[in-house]
Image (cartoon, grey):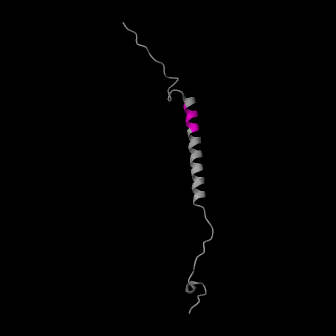
Amino acid sequence: MEQEEVLDNTHKDFAHNWVSSSRFLFYCQVVLFAAFLTGGCYGLYHHHYRGKPEVNVPDNTLYNPKYK
């Protein structure tokens, strides 16, 4: 009768080792949070308000309109 070799992979399995899996998930959350934070800051900087534009307003639409 042949004996089958059983490989013990429980110490390498993600689901069986909750300490390393929770540490891995924590670091994934930290990296994703940093990526979203950096992307959000870049988006706000890229689309920031550039100041008051010079707008030509017709004289007849002013609060005190000027007519010809």
Classify residue 19 by image quadrant: top right
- Indicate yes or no whether the magenta region holds residue 24: yes
Q: Considering only vertical position in the picture, is 7 above or below 59?
A: above
Q: Residue placed farthest to the left in the image?
A: 1
Classify residue 56 by image quadrant: bottom right
- Bounds of the magenta segment: 21-27
Query: Which residue is more in the foreground, 24 or 43?
Result: 43
Q: Residue at x 56, y 39 (%)?
A: 28
Quadrant in which the C terminus appears = bottom right
- Indicate yes or no whether the magenta region holds residue 63: no
Magenta stretch, main secondary structure, is helix
Classify residue 54 by image quadrant: bottom right
Name the spot of residue 29 as percent of width and height, x first.
56, 41
Name the spot of residue 30 as percent of width and height, x first.
59, 41
Q: Is residue 48 left or right of residue 16?
A: right
Name the spot of residue 21 as percent of width and height, x first.
54, 32
